[in-house]
Structures are given as structure tokens and as C-alpha cells.
């Protein structure tokens, strides 16, 4: 089939392009390279079934042409990363909401099946773990800009479900939890590549907050495999589906593990959120997915343990030094 990936020069999108091309599909990537990198697509640039278009998803003329030629859309284009969201809240809201409006409208116009990337951020400060897809959302005050990202992705979800309910659009929503692996940039606050680069350089590892907050880091290969299976699962249409792993680690222990695995002598330093971001910041202590739904739909089980994922990231970052 012919597949369109918005934001396909990004971390997850480029791995998805690799996997789809390996299966023999035609793949078109549209990306404005505001956060994505052409280097992420270097391995497929010469593939006769691959096409790259540098443009914004806000350009309706370009998107009309691209959606008209595809059969399936993976909508991954979004402002991502805590640091970027805090620093550029207007960009976050405009890209995530209006960009999705454009893509969903065209998907509906041409009758294209679409998988929309959402985020575990929509659970907000909910303390009822593990998070189930129908759980309530608890967000903080609007004065904390980080919640603009969660709100924008919630609007994406509402709009996707509205198109499905009102027009019968074949839309699937995936709530990604923390996805990690080679090619992920640490430039926008992603903690694993940031810690790895710091450890390899012998620099101080800066831990925001107490370090007691826990996260579940899922390997990008498991995420991509699930995305491909979900697009072919009719029962997933019109649904919201958690995607991640339940292997949990605190940020403090993550720093220790990376220092140990790199043989680094890097010291650790704890910063308050206000010191780190220059403004007040809300965070959640635990983020843990309930994966029973995706397991029922496609038999999903994460296969790559965190230690192997960290080995992959360390190997990748060493090559970049």
C-alpha cells in the first residue's frame, strides 16, 4: 500500500518508514524539519519506493496532493519534548491543533484510514495507575505551559473521534508513553539521550525534581511494530489505545544505570523544575500504562528490555561523538 507519514523525519516516524519500506510498501514522508532530521532518513533515501517532501502539514495545497495519493496515513507531526513545549507554547498549540485539523479533514475527504499519535500526557496528574484508556484526565493550572501540550493532544483525540462518529472516518488513536531508541534527540528535553550524551562526555547529569518520578521507557521497534499491526486491525478503528511498556524505573535510577553502563565518572546534580525550566512546572510522579486493550487487539507484548534499549542508545551516541 502507499503510506503517508507526517513528521516522518522525526525519531519514531523515521523508524516507521524503515519498517514499512522493508515490508515493500510505498512511503511518502512530509516534514518541515523544524525538529526532524534528514539524517534520520539517510538509510532509505535511495529506495525507489520512498519519497520525501519538505513542507508543513499546515500547507493545505501540499497536503491535499499527498493525501490524495496515499491509502493510509500515520499522523505523527507534532511539537514534542518538554523543553520545546515550555519554550514555544504558541508553536505547540498551533502545530498540534491546526495541523491535525488539516490532516483529519483531508483524510475524511479522501476516505483514508489514519492512525493519530497522541500521548500519555493526556492523563495529566491522575494518580490511579496503571492508566486505562477511559480513565479521567486531571490537568494542572493553565499557568503551567506544559499542560498546553496535553490539552492540544486531547483536542486532536476529540476531533479524530468526532470524525469517526459523525462521518465514519477510519481513525485510530495511539497514546504513546515514553518511547526511546537510536535517533532520539535530547535537544528538547528527552531524558534518555540527554543522560547518555552527558555520561559519555563525562559531564554532570542534571536530574530535574527529586528523581523519584518513575517512567516506562519502551523501545521504538516495539512501538513501530504495534503501529503497523494496529493499522490493519479493524477492531481498533474508533478506539483510543495505550502503547508502551510496563517496565518502570525512576529517573534517579535511570541516571545511575546509564552512568554504570557507560563506565562514566559523571556526577549527578539535582535541579528544581524552576531552575531547569526558568518557570514553575507541574509534573506527575508515576506514569504507567494499562496494556490490556492493545494486548487483546493485536497480542501486543513489548520484547526489548530497557537495558538492551540503553545499549542501543549508547552505541548510537558513541558513533555521533
Image (cartoon, rainbow, N blue to C red):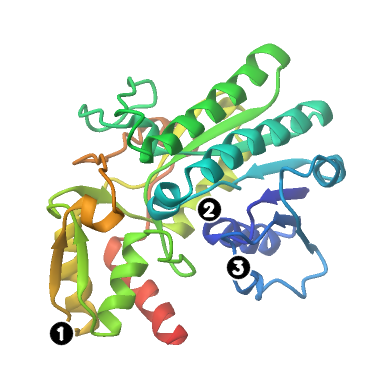
- Quadrant in the rendering for residue 21: bottom right
Instruction: Using the image as rendered, state which of residue 135 and residue 213 is in the foreground.
Output: 213
- In the drawing, what numbered circle is on residue 319? none
Q: Residue at x 49, y 69 (%)?
A: 183
Disc on res. 37: 3
Query: Label 1 to label 2, Cα distance in Å?
Result: 34 Å
Cα separation between marks 2 and 3: 18 Å
Residue 156 place in picture, x, y as percent: 56, 30
**Crowd class of label 1 (few under 14; some 14 to 19; many from 20; radius 10 Å):** some
User: In percent of the image, x 60 and y 68: which residue is there?
Assistant: 37
| Marking on residue 265 | 1
Image quarter of residue 200: bottom left
Query: In the rendered view, would you say 175 is above or below 193?
Result: above
Between disc 2 and disc 3, the foreground one is 3
Residue 309 visible somewhere in the drawing:
no
Taking 271 as reference, is 44 above or below it?
below
Q: Secondary structure at mark 3?
A: loop
Q: Position of residue 263 (x, y in %)?
A: 19, 85
> Does 65 appear above or below 202?
above
Mark toward the viewer: 1 or 2: 1
Among numbered discs 3 and 1, the one appearing first in the sequence: 3
- Image check: 75 left or right of 307? right
Q: Residue furthest top?
A: 166
Q: Circle 2 is placed at which residue position?
A: 224
Judge whether residue 252 can be spotted in this image: yes
Under circle 2, the secondary element is helix
Quadrant for the C terminus, please: bottom left
Amino acid at each position: 500500500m502507499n503510506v503517508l507519514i507526517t513528521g516522518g523525519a522525526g525519531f519514531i516516524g523515521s523508524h516507521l518508514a524503515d519498517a514499512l519500506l522493508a515490508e515493500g510498501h510505498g512511503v511518502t514522508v512530509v516534514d518541515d524539519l523544524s525538529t526532524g532530521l534528514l539524517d534520520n532518513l539517510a538509510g532509505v533515501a535511495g529506495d525507489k519506493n520512498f519519497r520525501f517532501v519538505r513542507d508543513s502539514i499546515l500547507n493545505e495545497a501540499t497536503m491535499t496532493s499527498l493525501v490524495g495519493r496515499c491509502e493510509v496515513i500515520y499522523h505523527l507531526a507534532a511539537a514534542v519534548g518538554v523543553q520545546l513545549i515550555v519554550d514555544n507554547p504558541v508553536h505547540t498549540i498551533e502545530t498540534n491543533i491546526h495541523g491535525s485539523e488539516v490532516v483529519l479533514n483531508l483524510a475524511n475527504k479522501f476516505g483514508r484510514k489514519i492512525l493519530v499519535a497522541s500521548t500519555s500526557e493526556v492523563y495529566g496528574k491522575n494518580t490511579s495507575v496503571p492508566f486505562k484508556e477511559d480513565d479521567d484526565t486531571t490537568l494542572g493550572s493553565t499557568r503551567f505551559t506544559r499542560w498546553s501540550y496535553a490539552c492540544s493532544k486531547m483536542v486532536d483525540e476529540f476531533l479524530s473521534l468526532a470524525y469517526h462518529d459523525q462521518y465514519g472516518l477510519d481513525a485510530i488513536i495511539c497514546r504513546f508513553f515514553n518511547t526511546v531508541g537510536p535517533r532520539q534527540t535530547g535537544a528538547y528535553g528527552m531524558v534518555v539521550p540527554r543522560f547518555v550524551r552527558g555520561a559519555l562526555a563525562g559531564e554532570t547529569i542534571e536530574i530535574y525534581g527529586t528523581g523519584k518520578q518513575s517512567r516506562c521507557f519502551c523501545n521504538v521497534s516495539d512501538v513501530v511494530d504495534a503501529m503497523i499491526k494496529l493499522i490493519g486491525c479493524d477492531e481498533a478503528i474508533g478506539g483510543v489505545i495505550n502503547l508502551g511498556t510496563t517496565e518502570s524505573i525512576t529517573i534517579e535510577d535511570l541516571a545511575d544505570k546509564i552512568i554504570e553502563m557507560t563506565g562514566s565518572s559523571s556526577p549527578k546534580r539535582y535541579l528544581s523544575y524552576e531552575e531547569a525550566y526558568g518557570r514553575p512546572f507541574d509534573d506527575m510522579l508515576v506514569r504507567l500504562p494499562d496494556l490490556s486493550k492493545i494486548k487483546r487487539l493485536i497480542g501486543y507484548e513489548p520484547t526489548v528490555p530497557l537495558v538492551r534499549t540503553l545499549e542501543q542508545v549508547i552505541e548510537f551516541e558513541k558513533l555521533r561523538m
